[in-house]
């Protein structure tokens, strides 16, 4: 073949590719979708037929594989954390990190119950509070408020009863700091800890 013919053929192929780019992509997508099932079936069959060989290879290279995984995790720690956080929010609550940040900002960057911005507890992180029956997000709370919500079993009447109980105690004992004899009232053994 002459050089001119080769150059002309290359130019024609390139022009054709540019003109029919979207059609080519669609054909490749259909082809790959059909091949995907064939590949899965072939891979499954291969794994069944070569199970011992695969296990022997994995055992022989386990230390190197673990070292490679550790090196990758160490080098990409922030990216892995970000992606797992995105996945966790999406899987468990159906929200994105942007929606989470907007919820937190809407609450003034503090707990929806007590307003504190000190996120004590597990991982020192805010906790997404949600209705366990419907799955709807109620707000973002601190660890202590989340525990309190759990203890009252998400029952508003019980929470109100607890608040009344605490108010009554405070009123009664702030007015009478000592008993009639003039002694301090009895205290719990672990009070003040």
Image: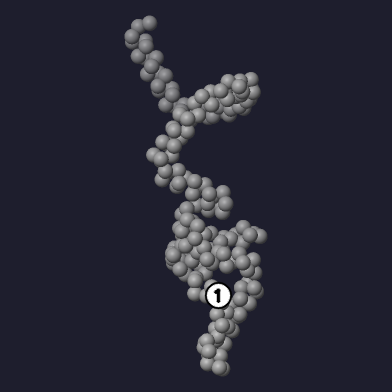
Residue 4: quadrant of the picture? top left
Classify the position of the N terminus by image quarter.
Answer: top left
Residue 68 occupies which quadrant of the picture? top left
Residue that badge 1 annotates: 189
> Residue at (56%, 77%) from the top-left corner?
188
Q: Residue 17 in the image: x percent, y percent?
A: 44, 24
Whether residue 56 is visible, yes or no, is yes
Q: Residue at x 56, y 54 (%)?
A: 93
The answer to whether one can see residue 24 in this image is no
Q: Please state the horizontal and vertical placement of residue 81, each as a whole percent of the image.
A: 45, 46
**For the residue labelled by badge 1, is the local secondary structure a helix, a strand or a loop?**
loop
Q: Choose between 99 and 130: the one closer to the eye.
A: 130
- Relative to residue 139, is residue 93 depicted above or below? above
Which of the pair 9/96 is nearer the observer? 96
Work out whether residue 64 or residue 146 is closer to the camera in this orientation and state it: 64
Give the colour scheme of this rendering: one colour
- Residue at the outermost top position: 1
The x, y position of residue 169, in whole percent, is: 58, 83
Q: Position of residue 53 (x, y in %)?
A: 58, 20
Q: Residue 142, relative to residue 6: is it above or below?
A: below
Task: Residue at 50%, 52% (x, y): give it.
Answer: 96
Total tally of numbered discs in the picture: 1
Left or right of residue 149: residue 67? left
At a point 61% along the width and 80% down the height, the residue shown is 165
Query: Dot 1, crowdedness within 10 Å: few (<14), some or many (≥20)?
Result: few
Instruction: Single out the residue that lies furthest toward the bottom.
Output: 180
Vertical position of residue 153 compared to residue 5: above or below: below
């Amino acid at each position: 073949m002459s050089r001119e013919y080769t150059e002309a053929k290359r130019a024609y192929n390139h022009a054709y590719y540019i003109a029919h780019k979207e059609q080519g992509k669609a054909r490749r997508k259909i082809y790959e979708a059909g091949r995907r099932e064939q590949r899965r079936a072939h891979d499954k069959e291969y794994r069944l037929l070569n199970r011992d060989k695969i296990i022997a290879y994995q055992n022989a290279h386990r230390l190197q594989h673990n070292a490679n995984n550790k090196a990758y995790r160490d080098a990409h720690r922030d990216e892995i954390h970000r992606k797992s956080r995105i996945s966790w929010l999406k899987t468990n609550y159906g929200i994105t990190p942007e929606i989470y940040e907007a919820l937190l900002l809407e609450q003034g960057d503090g707990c929806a119950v007590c307003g504190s911005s000190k996120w004590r507890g597990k991982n020192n992180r805010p906790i997404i509070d949600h209705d366990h029956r419907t799955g709807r997000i109620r707000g973002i709370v601190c660890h202590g408020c989340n525990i309190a919500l759990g203890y009252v079993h998400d029952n508003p009447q019980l929470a109100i009863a607890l608040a009344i109980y605490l108010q009554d105690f405070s009123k009664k004992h702030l007015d009478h700091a000592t008993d009639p004899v003039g002694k301090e009232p009895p205290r719990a053994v672990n009070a003040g800890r």
